[in-house]
């Protein structure tokens, strides 16, 4: 399902229902760039703190253009059952306004990233004009507090320190004083631009019985009683809250995913996880240890399929690659020849994805991630998973993942696991048994070490 701001409300309702019953989610992103230079790209000789600093710099430099989340649910049928997939392709663009308050976001772009996306038919106009807005809760709360203070006339007004602006402010001050002392019902203030209109709105808000409204590019000031002013202020706060909810946009999806506490799977996940946290949750902690602790409350069960492949010699030896773009078609072909492997089917309302397979579209790549993970589960000599066991869930089938929970692929010398959340710290080599944790299933994504925006094109060994 391709989702823009035009069909977001409908998609959000569908996602809310689906994430509540799904067994796991697969996640993928398309970004405006990865690393500014070779020097800023993580290196296997980096310490864990140096690696986190480089990832943090990348996330704070570049933006996210698409987020793919594919939800997988086990369905029983007469043939034993199958996984039903619902892939969502969310086009996301940072919120630009909250009410009359502009919201500015700065992000970097890499020319090769844009070229890569253009080659893969990315619609930049759709991204800008129809992208779902997003605004983190902490930013929304700050804006609400500022606007509420302004509505109550409690905020100090800051204006540009230039002669023309000072003269404009003095003129408005005189006009408002004269209007307040007169018996006139309305005062029209002529303005040349949005900045001057904001000044008039802010200055009038300092008067208990004056309110404002925009009119044909100007501002009209009108009288109200204190009781009417209280009602007007309450109405404006309700409108402000509605505009904040609209600006929050896609963050509602991530909030639902976080609250569901379902396993989230990706391929070469560190950048995806840090982007999800920083763009849609809250600012990244300054230190690696603080982030490892914080992510446990955000997405508590993470599984990185690149780590699974690289740390499982039988799989690595069989396919000789951990690139999703290479291994996914091999697994798909094997699955087609082996009816004993779990089937993956699209939910009927998501049949469009099956008919229009677009690589490097985040939604489809998230689906490929999940489907590949499911196929990896059945490999002989591969992942050491418990067989399907009786589960209290109505959807059945608990898959016990021993060595792979909360271990993201990241080379540290000879080690390859960055333990986050419950795992804590970095380390863990190929033979670590780790925490015994259970999750229903999770899925593979793409590789992000050196491609323009997408891991699919970029596997670091």
Image (cartoon, rainbow, N blue to C red):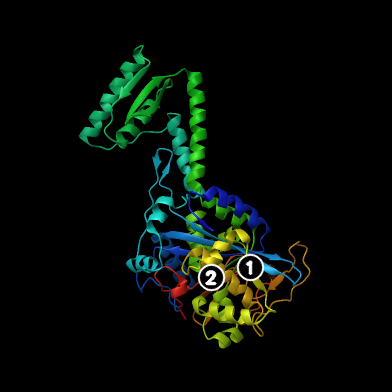
Which picture quadrant has residue 183? top left
Question: How far across and how far down the image is residue 250, in percent?
Answer: 51, 52
Which dot marks residue 336? none
The answer to whether 236 is drawn above or below residue 179 in the figure is below
Task: Return the residue found at the far left.
Answer: 163
Q: Which residue corresponds to mark 1?
A: 345
Query: Can I make out residue 282 in this image?
Result: no
Total number of numbered labels? Answer: 2
**Which residue appears at 52% of the width and 76% of the height?**
324
Frontmost residue, 430 versus 118: 118
Q: Is residue 161 left or right of residue 136?
A: left
Q: Please report whichever mark, 1 or 2, sits nearer to the chain's N-terminal start.
A: 1
Question: How far across and how far down the image is residue 263, in percent?
Answer: 63, 64
Q: Is residue 444 left or right of residue 275?
A: right
- The quarter of the rendered structure image containing the N terminus is bottom right
User: SS for tag 2?
Assistant: loop
Q: Pointer 1: residues within 10 angstroms few (<14), some, or many (20+)?
A: some
Question: How far across and how far down the image is residue 291, in percent?
Answer: 53, 62
Query: Can I make out residue 321 in this image?
Result: yes
The answer to whether 321 is drawn above or below residue 454 in the figure is below
Q: Pointer 2: residues within 10 angstroms few (<14), some, or many (20+)?
A: many
Question: How far across and how far down the image is residue 143, in percent?
Answer: 45, 41
CA–CA distance in space, label 1 to label 2: 18 Å
**Which residue appears at 40% of the width and 61% of the height?**
62
Task: Return the residue found at the far top.
Answer: 183
Which dot marks residue 445? 2
Q: Are marks 1 and 2 in contact (CB under 8 Å)?
A: no
Frontmost residue, 61 versus 412: 61
Closer mark to the observer between disc 1 and disc 2: 1
User: SS for tag 1?
Assistant: strand
């Amino acid at each position: 399902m391709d989702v823009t701001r035009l069909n977001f409300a409908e998609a959000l309702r569908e996602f809310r229902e689906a994430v509540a019953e799904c067994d796991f989610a697969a996640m993928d992103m398309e970004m405006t760039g990865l690393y500014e230079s070779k020097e800023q790209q993580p290196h296997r000789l980096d310490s864990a703190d140096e690696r986190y600093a480089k990832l943090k710099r990348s996330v704070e430099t570049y933006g996210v253009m698409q987020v793919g989340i594919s939800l997988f649910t086990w369905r029983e049928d007469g043939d034993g059952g199958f996984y039903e997939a619902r892939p969502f392709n969310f086009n996301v663009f940072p919120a630009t306004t909250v009410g009359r308050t502009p919201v500015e976001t700065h992000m970097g772009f890499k020319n090769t990233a844009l070229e890569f996306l253009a080659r893969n038919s990315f619609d930049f106009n759709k991204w800008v004009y129809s992208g779902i807005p997003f605004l983190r809760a902490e930013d929304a709360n700050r804006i609400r507090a500022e606007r509420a203070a302004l509505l109550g006339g409690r905020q100090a007004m800051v204006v540009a320190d230039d002669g023309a602006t000072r003269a404009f402010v003095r003129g408005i001050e005189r006009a408002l004083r004269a209007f307040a002392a007169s018996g006139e019902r309305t005062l029209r203030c002529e303005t040349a631009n949005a900045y001057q209109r904001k000044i008039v709105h802010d200055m009038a808000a300092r008067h208990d019985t004056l309110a404002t409204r925009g009119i044909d590019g100007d501002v009209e000031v009108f009288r109200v009683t204190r009781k009417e002013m209280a009602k007007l202020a309450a109405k404006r706060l309700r409108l402000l809250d509605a505009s904040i909810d609209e600006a929050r946009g896609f963050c509602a999806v991530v909030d639902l995913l976080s609250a569901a506490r379902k396993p989230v799977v990706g391929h070469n996940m560190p950048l995806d996880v840090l982007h999800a946290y920083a763009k849609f949750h809250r600012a990244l902690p300054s230190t690696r240890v603080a982030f490892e602790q914080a992510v446990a409350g955000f997405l508590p069960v993470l599984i990185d399929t690149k780590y699974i492949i690289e740390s499982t010699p039988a799989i690595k030896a069989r396919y000789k690659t951990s690139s999703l773009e290479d291994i996914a078609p091999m697994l798909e072909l094997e699955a087609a020849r082996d009816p004993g492997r779990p089937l993956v089917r699209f939910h009927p309302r998501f049949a469009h994805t099956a008919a229009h397979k677009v690589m490097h579209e985040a939604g489809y790549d998230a689906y490929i991630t999940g489907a590949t993970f499911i196929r990896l589960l059945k490999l002989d000599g591969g992942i050491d998973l418990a067989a399907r066991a009786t589960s209290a869930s109505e959807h059945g089938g608990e898959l016990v993942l021993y060595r792979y929970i909360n271990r993201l692929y990241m080379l540290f010398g000879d080690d390859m696991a960055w333990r986050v959340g419950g795992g804590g710290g970095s380390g863990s080599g190929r033979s670590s048994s780790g925490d015994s944790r259970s999750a229903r299933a999770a899925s593979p994504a793409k590789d992000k070490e050196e491609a323009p925006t997408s891991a699919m094109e970029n596997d670091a060994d």
